Image (tube, coloured by chain):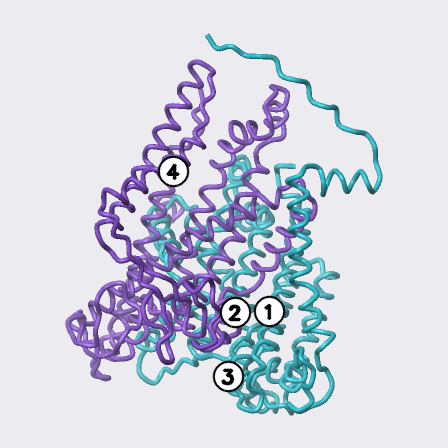
Amino acid sequence: MAVYSKKETRKAPSNVKGLTFWLRENLFSSPFNVALTLLGVMLLVWVIPPFVKWAYLDANFAGSTREDCTGGGACWVFIRMKIDMFMYGFYPSEFRWRVNTVYGLFLVLVAAFRYLKSPVLKIVLAHVYFIAGFILVHGGLAGLEVVPTDKWGGLMLTIMVAAVGIVSAFPLGVILALGRASHLPIIRSLSVTYIEFIRGVPLITILFMSSVILPLFFPEGMNFDKLLRALIGIAMFEAAYIAENIRGGLQSIPKGQYEAADAIGLSYWQKMFLVILPQALKVAIPNLVGVSIALFQDTTLVLIIGLFDLLAMVRLSAADSYWLGYETEGYVFVTFIFWFFCYMMSNFSQKLEKRFNTNLRK
Amino acid sequence: MLALLRNQKIRGIIFQLLTVIGLVAFLWYIGANTVANIEQRGIQTGFGFLEGTAGFGIDQSPIPYTEENTHGRVFIVGLLNTMIIAAVGIVFSTIVGLLIGILRLSNNWLIAKLAKAYIDFFRNIPLLLQILFWYNVVLRAMPNPKQSYNFFDTIFINNRGLYFPQPEYNTTFFAILISFAVAFACVFVLNRWANRRKEATGKDFFVLPWGIALFLLFPALAYWIGGAQLHFSFPELRGFNFKGGKVLSPEFLALAFALTIYTATFIAEAVRSGIEAVSHGQKEAAASMGFSPYQSLKLVILPQAIRIAIPPIINQYLNLTKNSSLATAVGYPEIVTVFAGTSLNQVGQAIEIIAMTMLVYLIISLLVSALLNWFNHKMKIKER
């Protein structure tokens, strides 16, 4: 027979408030916590002051040559002198206004999306934006001089690969998700095979495939641009991940919705596009933003197949014999840019989650 | 006829037939083009190239490898290196991830915020950038061997890598290795026995001191039984480089650091969301039963949190394995670097080589999802 002894009653929680109370509760509640707090403070002291000293106090901002970097800290002159390369790659400087126009038009697009009500108009407008953007950047129409894709690079290429990748993978992802949820056995198994295959292999092998094997698949003379091949690979890759997230959304829709749509006599496509998908996508949006963040990070992989995205431009500039030894500044700069974009996107997704209230736990 | 077309079953069959016909036609078109292109470019086909001499060196190989070896052996070396980096990454990212995940939930405000800052910072930076940063900015900027960072004259870090002593693989060494396994098994059995006894009689048995004693005693015994012949080969500076000991290359270190730090953020988030997913009522129930915070964590919260946290963590292991392919950016000789990279450039048989590489990753991920299914089945809540 087990013998249990009575335990001492615990102290009731204190109802004192104020700064000292907060400090005692949150930082110094036990000897172990005091030690942890001290450790944390030590870590901060060890990391932050040296970094501020290097990046700001001892750093050089002004000037235009290597000799202007006299302080012991960072040489931001390097970034300033190379910023055009980081932003536009080898895009000819006299045509850069075209890229800037596309950025500007994006703001117009976002503003228009806020005021437009009709989804059809929105979709049409988005398509017009992408086509106009391509014509502006690439040229060849309306008297614009052609800028071949091997001149594209830097942040512009990174953003473009990410945007085009997501946008073109999205319809394919929706179709694959519907296929996986379908009752038709052949359609379902084809979708499952595709999704599981793509999700089972690393992006880099798919990029190798699209850059080395894809040209073999099509007749001689049908030349794919290197950038286009990378985009095809990325879109194929991303579609599988988008499909999985949309499937999650589809599964969260109660069966009654399907039955109701059937009961009022909607066809399969009407049922899906008017009833099921609008609800499923809403549930899936936070996760889809997550996919977008992952894709944005994954765009850096295109440097392995020889495209010059932001990271590749920084590597190239750091290898410039005149600016040798300043690669740390370059890497810190790219880190900041990527971190900024990804952090903004993940904050955005948390906001969306709150707005749609798809988190059913609360 | 029209009525037949309106029948849902018939329409389904027609739709599927059309899809299959379209797919077959597309594949046939691609196949025909590929055959024509391969013939025209004079590319060899088949897997004969695996027998051919590779003719290039690999600087890190767990098995003996020379330039005269075949491409088949290159494949094996690459595969083994992939497994090594994956194993190292999984072990360390689990340790760091668990630690950060627990700190994230600490009631110490500063520590919780620091853990959150770690997660928010590192998961929002591309892995490739992190690998390149460690490699180019940190490890290759280390001093040359003569000015190495020296830790107690046994461990050295310089721009050629991390040097540390290596034991000689003799009987003593293996006896100690085995003794650790035996001690581990003993502690496992002891723990089960202690739990059973506690359930039956309510008597506590503290396994920890006994476990520590076993882990000290068994290797010491094994040392004497195995002949007391434990020798280390120490790294020593000879001329311009170190001789002796074991070296971890900068490529390996950069990859291991980056994979660990990056994956740990996701594991930490999985741990956190697992623990937070346990409903508050459970914690309150445990507290009102008079459980101490440690007891409520061990007996109430963790058993439920693990069920939720393990599947995403295993998925992260799979992601880590796939991400190890980024090694190709720094040249660590795993399968994508040496086989889908160097061998592919030499042989030119892209289809076979990339298919084999993809197959490796596919098999790994199929095995992992089989493991996950088994786990989910085993962990399923047994409802009445």
Using the rendered image, report if marks 4 and 3 lie on a common chain.
no
Residue at 35% across, 52% down: B365
Q: Secondary structure at mark 2?
A: helix
Residue at 66% across, 81% down: A75
Q: Give the mark toward the camera: 1 or 3.
A: 1
**Chain of the residue under the numbered disc 3 shown in the image:** A
Question: Which chain did the image draw in cyan?
Answer: A
Looking at the image, which is closer to me, A116 or B120? B120
Q: Return the disc, 1 or 3, that comes first in the chain's sequence.
A: 3
User: Is the residue B383 above or below the residue A81 in the image?
Assistant: above
Q: Disc 2 designates what residue?
A: B129
Figure quadrant of residue A254: top right
Q: Left or right? Give the position of A258 relative to B251.
A: right
Is the Cβ of the residue at disc 4 closer than 8 Å to that at disc 3?
no
Q: Give the mark toward the camera: 1 or 4.
A: 1
Using the rendered image, report if marks 1 and 4 lie on a common chain.
no
Measured in 3D between alpha carbons, the distance from the residue under mark 1 to the one under mark 3, in whole angstroms, is 25 Å
- Which kind of residue does numbered mark 2 sit on? Leu
Q: Give the mark toward the camera: 4 or 2.
A: 2
Q: Quadrant of the C terminus of chain A?
A: top right
- Which kind of residue does numbered mark 4 sit on? Phe
Residue at 40% across, 59% down: B322
Q: Secondary structure at mark 4?
A: helix
Using the rendered image, report if marks 2 and 1 lie on a common chain.
no
Using the rendered image, report if marks 1 and 3 lie on a common chain.
yes
Q: Disc 3 designates what residue?
A: A149
Q: Disc 4 designates what residue?
A: B375
Question: Which chain did the image draw in purple?
Answer: B
Is the Cβ of the residue at disc 2 closer than 8 Å to that at disc 1?
yes
User: Is the residue B103 above or below the residue B36 in the image?
Assistant: above
